[in-house]
Amino acid sequence: MNIFSIIEPRTQREELKSVIGKEVSQNFSPTCRGKLLKVNKVYSLFESVPSPYVKNPKPGSVGVLYKVPNSIAWNSFFY
């Protein structure tokens, strides 16, 4: 274990909390677009939203809640 493995997850959580409510392209979403709703210690909660690139999304794909690890959520917004 080194100092970066201790500090980095905390920093990622703080940065993710600053973008709660924002939309981002997200590969785990059924629509490939998600809105960040909540950030926990390990996972972030997203809601799938309509993609600007698809005119008619699949029925039931919008509004789905799903979790992704914070590291992947952080990567979606800040990388």
Image: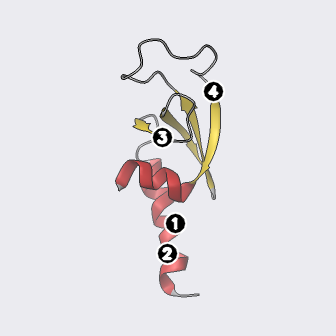
Q: Which mark is residue 7?
A: 2
| Rendering quarter of residue 38 | top right
Measured as percent of width and height from the top left, residue 48 is found at 54, 29
Residue beneath the point at 57% across and 16% down? 58
Q: Earlier in the sequence, mark 4 or mark 1?
A: 1
* Residue located beneath label 1 in the image: 10
For marks 3 and 4, give the CA distance. 13 Å
Measured as percent of width and height from the top left, residue 3 is found at 50, 85
User: Are the residues flagged by discs 2 and 1 in contact, CB closer than 8 Å?
Assistant: yes
**Picture layout, residue 40 above or below residue 49:** below
Q: Earlier in the sequence, mark 3 or mark 2?
A: 2
Say which of marks 4 and 2 sits in front: 4
Please name the amino acid that badge 4 sits on: Val
| Rendering quarter of residue 37 | top right
Q: Which mark is residue 21?
A: none
For marks 2 and 1, give the CA distance. 6 Å
Say which of marks 1 and 3 sits in front: 3
Crowd tier of the residue under label 2, counting other residues whose Cα lies within 10 Å: few below 14, some 14–19, many 20 or above:
few
**Picture layout, residue 76 above or below residue 25:** below
For marks 1 and 3, give the CA distance. 21 Å
Q: Which mark is residue 26?
A: 3
Q: Which mark is residue 64?
A: 4
Q: Earlier in the sequence, mark 1 or mark 3?
A: 1
Q: Is residue 67 found left or right of 27 in the rendered image?
A: right
Q: Is residue 44 found left or right of 34 in the rendered image?
A: right
For marks 4 and 1, give the CA distance. 27 Å
